[in-house]
Image: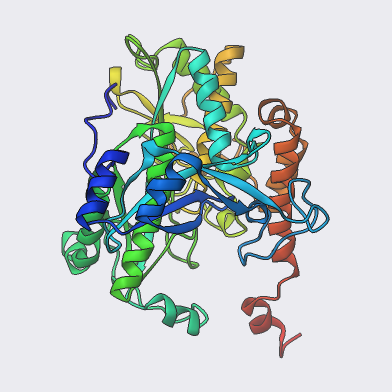
Amino acid sequence: MSQQSGPQPQGLLSLEALAQQVEEGAIETVIAAFPDHYGRLLGKRFEAEYFLQEVAGHGTHGCDYLLTTDMEMNPVPGYRFASWELGYGDFHLVPDLSTLRLASWLERSAIVLCDVEREQTGGVSIAPRSLLKAQVQRAAELGYRALAASELEYYLFTTSYREAHAQGYQGLKPAGWYIEDYHLLQGSRVEDYTAAVRRNLKRSGIPVENSKGEWGLGQHEINVRYAEVLEMADRHVLYKQCMKEIADQMGVSVTFMAKFTHGQAGSSSHLHLSLWLPGGSAFAGEGAEGSEVFRWFLAGWIAHTEEFMPFYAPTVNSYKRYEDGSWAPTRLAWSHDNRTAGFRVVGQGQSLRIECRIPGADCNPYLAFTAALASGLDGIRRRLEPPPAFRGDIYAAQHLPRVPYTLGEASERFAQSAFVREVLGSEVQEHYAHFFRSEWQAYNRAVSDWERQRYFERI
């Protein structure tokens, strides 16, 4: 990473440019979206003229139950933020016009991301984008700006989403039939889909670096260019939306589950992060391990990983990815350019950065980057020193602390953490503890195919 994140990408729109394209008939629909706790984009589609006349300046409304639902969109009881008792009223969606861009994968459409506010009290602290903006502000108060990238892996299937659902997500046909890590022939076989994604991301203001095959059958990765950390989180959720909608249009499907199936590699979302001062990288130093700021930030990030684990691994499925020898990290250690480490230090000088390999592709990027920044900035504040760099196979280092085994375990550590309460506030901690506990409880109530196959006849 260099200090400059590049020229203004094509595809971003000013209001004036949007108005011109609306007048020319090139854009008819503007989508106003916001990320929920899962990192999904929710929102509304507006006639473009109405968006320009009303929504761009005044925002719109949404039901506040959207920040208290489960994956099935069922309202979950027990939240202070919104409930049946409080009547499930509205919150305000305020377009962040710096995110306004073409959605070139959709016909004559643009999209803008919104911040969630209460009209009387301002920003909603529990909204994922609000959490990350608060940590960006904390970094700015210390003189830093954070540059970041997230590397998303996914599995591609020739089965459509509708067919996959009808089949109970069983018997899906992977796009590849042998391990295709860096394999160009296998990549060529799905280039119709991958090229369409690259092309539309670029046209929609999300610069792409490359695409490649990954280790699993039908597993791939498309890397988009790094940016300021909030912009990177925005790119991340738009990237997923674009990929799913293009897959739907082409009659195929993709999944960002952390562990799609036993025996195949999990899908990760490696986070790259560095801090910058006006004169250059705050991580760069004369020694091989970088500056004091780099060491302090790395130490804080590692020190608080366990208590922030649900922000990196938010689903029940997340924890099935952490298998020794599977390319997913299982222990909390750092190393130079070592893919068995939870924290891999890469680059040198102005490009020196930390790659955290713990999050899966199912992470909400706003929450993951919030945890990373809050933890690292605490390391700077307290001038923490990291443990010695580990050399060798970290999978074999049984003495090192391990990531939690389940979402249930991780949720309790999060709920009881004094540090999480200090940096996020008790309201946010309580809200998300309830969210993760509810997900874990829903899993514990479910009866799985594995149980029926194992116990139906033979127990």
Q: Position of residue 302 (x, y in %)?
A: 56, 29
State left or right for residue 317 relative to residue 8.
right
Image quarter of residue 148: top left
In this orientation, does residue 202 appear? yes
Image quarter of residue 346: top left
Q: Is residue 72 above or below residue 360?
A: below
Image quarter of residue 77: bottom right
Residue at 49% x, 77% y: name it. 169
Residue at 26% x, 61% y: name it. 180
Pick the quarter of the image with the N terminus.
top left
Q: Position of residue 385 (x, y in %)?
A: 55, 16
Residue at 26% x, 24% y: name it. 4
State left or right for residue 290 relative to residue 39.
left
Q: Is residue 336 above or below residue 88?
A: above
Seen as rendered, the residue at the extreme front is 53
Pick the quarter of the image with the C terminus.
bottom right
Residue sitting nearer the eye, 153 or 127: 127
State left or right for residue 121 relative to residue 265.
right
